Image (cartoon, rainbow, N blue to C red):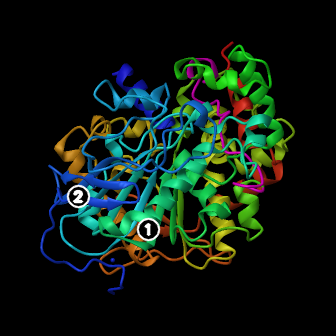
Amino acid sequence: MRGKLSVMILMALMTLGLTTSQAVHAAPISCEEPVASAAGLVKGAADAESATCSWKGVPYAAPPEGELRWKAPQPVPSWEGARETVHYGNRCWQKGMMNSLEGKSGPGMSEDCLYLNVWRPREAGVYPVMVWIHGGGYTGGTGATPMYIGDRLSENGGLVVVTINYRLNAFGFLAHEQFREEDPHQAVGGYGSLDQVAALQWVHDNIAHFGGDPDRVTIFGESAGGWSVCTMLATPLARGLFQGAILESGGCEASHTLEEGFGRGRKAAKKLGCAEDDVACMRSRPAEEVLEKMMPEGLLAFPFMPHEDSYLLTGTPLRMIQAGNFNNVAFIAGSNRDEVSKVAALLKPRTYHDRARTYEKGIRKFAPDADPARLMALYPLSQYGKPRYAYAQMFTDRALGCPTYEGMEAVAARQPQTYYYRFDYDRFRFGQTIGAIHAMELPFVFGNLDRKPINLLYNTPARVAEAQPLARIIQGYWINFAKTGNPNSEGLPAWPRFRLDDTKVQVLDVNVTTETPALADRCQLWADYGQSYPALMENVLKAAEKK
């Protein structure tokens, strides 16, 4: 049992008024009939488990290999005839937990990985579109993970669902002065994010051929996919490409300055045995070597993020949104009650055995230069019992809870259609031990409680049946929002808007309730503290070193 628990801990850490956009039901369509795209015809198939058609492995940009490595995505070369798109495309180069979830039966790895997947109802009509951006710390993941299969969301919601790949780790987020000089826009260090923009542009230009409404697109993503949603909100490059956004357990602070990025770029050249300014040498290195020498060790190290290059981003996404410089669309955001707090409390760092008398000392290790008295007041030991539980809650707030809440506040200052949630459901295998942890809302959104790897937690028919009412509610909220910009409809618990003068959070649990969130004061503390997210991770790593 310990081994299985460890696997699940690591997985969690990584890791409906008719409108012109709604479907007009008609006779079933032929899923095998070739469909037009800008580069050529594609031929899909009828989904075996749902009343949907699917197209898998549709290229949306040219393979970013050879001379195109570390360059902005380029148009897809055209082809003749109908291209079969019935198998997922390669996943982008990666290693670690997210890669292991695919197993040997998953798609292979390659730099030729800029593919997307489409599901649509098997009836003629014009449907709203949801575009999924996967998580994985910007180092791993794929749009083909079983957790993200979009057939049920498409069928249940009357939606076109798209999942995408994008470049990861060093391939997607390495910055170097020479890369900047090569680019006509001086774009650098955000190739994975530029891939996401290119995928959204593909959706805008092509999705009508697949039954989608290009004027009713909602982006959604979790973890690094949530960070990506905030980047898409901020970047002017995505303007007009979507009309709604859902951020799940991410935040808006995940970016690097060019100074930080160029320093890493020079070190990267050396690691690859190249002169600091020899990018031709860097591009000549095999992808396997780049991956092996550039990937960090450990789950908490996040050196790869988009850069503030004045093209993709002019500052952190949060600062851009706070300044009103963003794509102002209807917005849902939220995080999970425990995220990593209960899991972190199970680990044994140097502070694991701290007692009440050493609480202040432990705080100084976790957050140097922060006001320990203020921290102790907001995280009182009387509430947590032992220091390690308080430290764990600080970590989950600072890493995921507060970045999400701050993003919600920033959008809500200018967008009335904002909705905030907290996911609390923990009635699954090991749930009492690890809690409502990171990524546990995903099977509820996609309706995939019985699919790998989540079925390891929902491992009995009784557990699946008990969770289904909440799954219907959550999926109903997401579907309504994609159709109208409002998650509410008859038959669902009323979800009030989040307003700065009346903050409300929708608690998603066995019983769905509305509360006033308790994060505001804590998040203000962390905002005043000002330490960047990557820097905090460094402190956490140091504090987690064993004696």
Depicted 330 relative to depicted 345: above or below: below
Q: Are marks 1 and 2 in contact (CB under 8 Å)?
A: no
Query: Whole-percent x and y of residue 168?
Result: 55, 36
Q: Nearer the viewer, residue 363 or 307?
A: 307
Q: Nearer the viewer, residue 540 or 78?
A: 78
Q: Residue at x 48, y 48 (%)?
A: 61
Q: Quadrant of residue 298?
A: top right
Q: Dot 2: what SS?
A: loop
Farthest residue toward the front?
80
Farthest residue toward the left?
27
Q: Which numbered marker is on residue 34?
A: 2
Which callout, 1 or 2, points to the residue nearer the camera?
A: 2
Q: Quadrant of the C terminus?
A: top right
Query: Whole-percent x and y of residue 26?
Result: 16, 77
Q: Quadrant of residue 35?
A: bottom left
The residue at which mark 1 appears reads as 513
Over which residues does the magenta segment extend? 291-314
Q: Amino acid at mark 1?
A: Thr
Q: Dot 1: what SS?
A: strand
Residue 300 colored in magenta in the image: yes
Query: Whole-percent x and y of residue 509?
Result: 39, 58
Say few, some or many: other residues with alpha carbon within 10 Å of mark 1 (under 14 / 14 to 19 / 20 or more). Answer: few
